[in-house]
Image (tube, grey):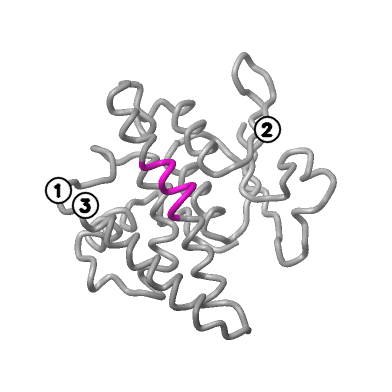
Amino acid sequence: MIELYTWMTDNGYKARHMAEESGLPYVLKPVNLRNKEQFAPAFLKISPGHKIPAIVDTEGPGGQRITLCESGAILKYLGEKSATGLYPSDPVRRVAVDQWLFYGSATFTTLAQQFGHWVIRTTEDVPPAKKHYEAVLHDMLATLDGHLATNDYMAGGYSVADIAIYADVHVHGTKDIGLALFPNVKRWHDAIAARPAVVRAWTPY
């Protein structure tokens, strides 16, 4: 059984999205960030950096109980375990998936979160930071739009690469920036948003 420790953030929804797509049985374990539950000693044993999401798999490799944090690692792990093709076994396709999985986890989400902080949430008005991160998010969306002009999904068929990027496009692209200038991203986003697993994953809790 997978225990999914998460909350209603971009990375948190990313992991729940993957859990729903995987078809693996899992139980949701909300970690209320507003109440600082991520600093509870029991949670720190699962996620030493006090970050969500994190998982416990009571039936990990070799039947061992494993813990895992970092959204990209969780997507890869659940993709491999579920054998759904979301993380492909073909080594050539896996290279392409890894490229965009890491882009989504390490670049896109990281910078989109900075956009969210400086442009949307902070009460401190810092015009240079706002200008910078608005430009960064536009640039990243343009990068995705150019790639998706000739690709239905980020790395061939639908995969963990798409899941790694979707959450921040959904949170910041559709709501804060708008996708009018990025029609290929909008087509990609809307196709993913209509998936039953995504509808289930993006319900509040």
Residue 178 sits in which quadrant? Answer: bottom left
Residue 92 image label: none
Residue 150 image label: 1
Q: Quadrant of the C terminus?
A: bottom right
Front: mark 1 or 2: 1
The residue where tag 3 is placed is: 148
Q: In the image, which residues are magenta?
A: 100-108
C-alpha gap between disc 1 and disc 2 = 38 Å
- The kind of secondary structure element at disc 3 is helix
Q: Amino acid at mark 3?
A: Leu
Q: Position of residue 81 (x, y in %)?
A: 49, 26
Asked whether, in this view, residue 159 is left or right of residue 204, the answer is left
Asked whether, in this view, residue 2 is left or right of residue 162, the answer is right
- The kind of secondary structure element at disc 1 is loop
Disc 3 to disc 2: CB gap under 8 Å? no
Q: Is residue 107 magenta?
A: yes
Residue lying at the far front in this picture: please name it. 128
